[in-house]
Image (cartoon, rainbow, N blue to C red):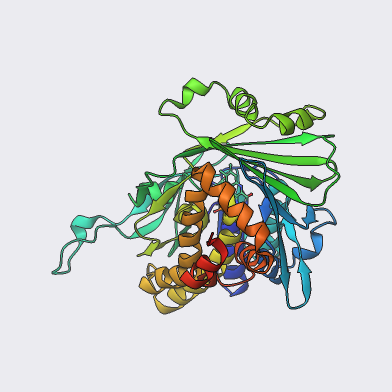
Amino acid sequence: MVVGAGPAGSVTAALLAEAGHDVLLLDRARFPRAKPCSEYTGPGSEAVLARLGVLPLVGHGIGQRLRGMEIHAPNGARHLLQYRDHAGPRSGLSLPRADLDAALLRTASARGAEIREGFRVGALQLADVSDHVDNGPPPSVPAVHGVVGRDAKGGTHAISARLVVGADGRHSIVTRALGLGRPVRWPRRLGLVSHYRDVPWPIDHGEMRVSQHGYIGVAPLGNGVLTVGLVRPLPPRARSLGSPAAALDQALREYPDLAARLARGRRVRPVHGVGPMAHAVRACGGDGYLLVGDAAGFLDPFTGEGIHRALRGAEIAAAAADRALRAGSDAAAIGAEYAQTRRALFGAKERLTAIIQLFVHAPALMNYVVERLNQRPVLAAQFANVLGDLEPPARALRPAYLWALLKP
Ligand SMILES: Cc1cc2nc3c(=O)[nH]c(=O)nc-3n(C[C@H](O)[C@H](O)[C@H](O)COP(=O)(O)OP(=O)(O)OC[C@H]3O[C@@H](n4cnc5c(N)ncnc54)[C@H](O)[C@@H]3O)c2cc1C
């Protein structure tokens, strides 16, 4: 069973169903549904979308391709991050989440998963730890046997499963019910997103503008729509910011020329706020459960991380779940190997993303970095490829590379 039909859940469900498992995919929403997101992902996501058969839709019904992202430092210096591999230039993808997620849900259904929309999971069915008959201490996380939730008509259902995949996002009930959440002290930021229409945007790339107090990402989504995502520190009392729309309008004052440009169009979607965005977990798999996508942790959207992590994470989650389901007759046990595979795949990028967070947080450092990117185009191109998940991130973490890029 998979809880949550965002990219992580739908892709995990599609791959498990294709591998011959009975899969039930539950989501509290009805699709297509909006998702607070700046909706940009690097070219590294293309391969997964191609494997799922969704890539041909990009530009023909879903979003558009972009030449890259232009970083604007607080002092006005700019650098356009562009991607390139042996075959030539590669593009980033600007993908309306309502369309992308609905397409991935259809893929899961077409590959054999049973879909139940409008079903909100409220609790897990857990093994009673007092029944633990081993000689050792009881496990710190009980085994999971299924979920309890409500359908759209208010009916309560208990559904058993050999494996519950928690793909239910930032505020995952699966993570919370198992007590696996680990708050992240820094960064503590609020994300505010919306769509604008009829804003003149003649360029074929997005912009990421960094200010004294955060940053704003803007990118065309196709059909005359711009996606706007603003990130700022989360004050101790978030209510002091007023409504999400008021908070966005106030924060836009830090970007006066962009605000003036947006004012030439109109906001066409309510402003959604999410905060704090960063969170972590202390385990991503165990007896009868597995976490994937944001449910397994998230830092910050500056590097367009989440969609790629959800898609690639789902591929390794499905492989781990497949092995566990074939191995056991009762609850499927997800072993340490899954966590190791995640670390091997995402660990270096997580470290790089944390370093980038330091730059985003310190305007003088960001000014310095953007100037160096402009002075060193070959190294800057490698950096763009790493951010776009085209090249292994370990390269950008090598001291020799960092020194060559950042030296005075
Ligand atoms: C402001 C902001 C901007 C971002 N911008 C970007 C960006 O530009 N690029 C990028 O790559 N990433 C970005 N991200 C991150 C990205 O949105 C996530 O990493 C990505 O959506 C994770 O996918 P997921 O499938 O794990 O979770 P989600 O997409 O959150 O899907 C989870 C699903 O679970 C369902 N669900 C939740 N609870 C329950 C329940 N109790 N019962 C049943 N169903 C449930 C929800 O309805 C939802 O459909 C951004 C995030 C934020 C907050």
- Dividing the picture into quadrants, the one containing residue 369 is bottom right
Above or below residue 187? Residue 85 is below
- Dividing the picture into quadrants, the one containing residue 24 is bottom right
Residue 274 on image: x %, y % = 53, 37
Above or below residue 332? Residue 139 is above
Of all residues shown, which one is farthest toward the left? 135
Q: Considering depth in this image, is 259 or 130 the residue closer to the camera?
A: 259
The residue shown at (67%, 30%) is 270
Residue 143 on image: x %, y % = 32, 60
- Dividing the picture into quadrants, the one containing residue 281 is bottom left
The residue shown at (55%, 41%) is 151
Q: Considering depth in this image, is 226 or 79 the residue closer to the camera?
A: 79
Q: Is residue 300 visible?
A: no
Of all residues shown, which one is farthest toward the front? 408
The residue shown at (77%, 51%) is 205
Horizontal side, residue 351 vs residue 59: left or right: left
Q: Considering depth in this image, is 25 or 42 the residue closer to the camera?
A: 42
Residue 95 on image: x %, y % = 73, 52
Above or below residue 270? Residue 354 is below
Q: Quadrant of the C terminus?
A: bottom right
